[in-house]
Image: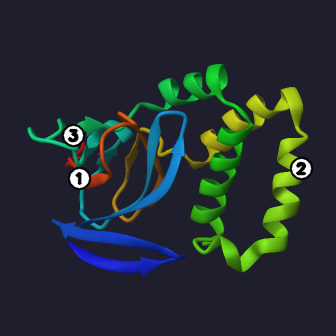
Amino acid sequence: SIEMPYKGLAYSMLAKAGVTVMVAQLNRSILEYATVQVWISNGSKRALHVSPQFFELRQEPAAPPPAAMINGTNEDLVLNDIQEHAKAKDLGELVNAYETTLFGFGNEKSVGFYQQRKHAVLSNMGGGGKLRAVATASAIILPDRVLKPGETIDGTVFFHIDTHNGRIAYVGAHLACAI
């Protein structure tokens, strides 16, 4: 893959048979999910089925043997988990992930005063925070859909990880043309 900076993130890019996939680790842990931003362009002549479950990652374990591959989690499971378990900290992380992907705020120090105001508002949201967390996750999550030739899509893939294992060592994708 080729490393490529874009919107404050370090993407790894790979193209094959007209399909380009870029992935960047967001370094945001939400509940027990690691988050990876993906961007896919279908430059092939066939439709392409895209789904979070088609992405996988491997954590770097503290000791051998190698950790098992973890597939991306489907949208409904992520949204249900967030609705049931999200706290104010998780909402803040979701908003940070959203802003990073949308506006390129990869360097949070560059928007310090804005960050202070935002965190003050988020901490005072009370009970409505879970609804906002679900809405924010819905806005950024990679949907399960078919990309027609010439279409692009981006979104965040959530991976349910073991928080005691090491850092993410590998992210991959298994995409195939739709029939």
Q: Is residue 111 left or right of residue 113?
A: left
When the figure is inspected, residue 39 is found, relative to residue 113, above or below; the finding is above
Point out the frontmost of discs 3 and 2. Answer: 2
When the figure is inspected, residue 129 is found, relative to residue 122, above or below; the finding is above
Q: Which residue is mark 3?
A: 179
Q: Which residue is depicted at the point 51% across and 45% down?
A: 29
Q: Which residue is mark 2?
A: 121
Q: Which residue is mark 1?
A: 172
Q: Amino acid at mark 2?
A: Val
Q: Nearer the viewer, residue 63 or 102?
A: 63
Q: Which residue is depicted at the point 48% across and 58% down?
A: 26
What mark, if any, has residue 163 been given in the picture? none
Q: Residue 170's image quarter?
A: bottom left
Point out the frontmost of discs 1 and 3. Answer: 1
Mark 1 Cα-neighbour bin, 10 Å: few <14, some 14–19, many ≥20? some
Q: Which residue is depicted at the point 30% across and 70% down?
A: 12
Q: Which residue is depicted at the point 24% across and 61% down?
A: 45
Mark 2 or mark 1: whose residue is earlier in sequence: 2
Label 1: state its secondary structure: strand
Q: Amino acid at mark 1?
A: Gly
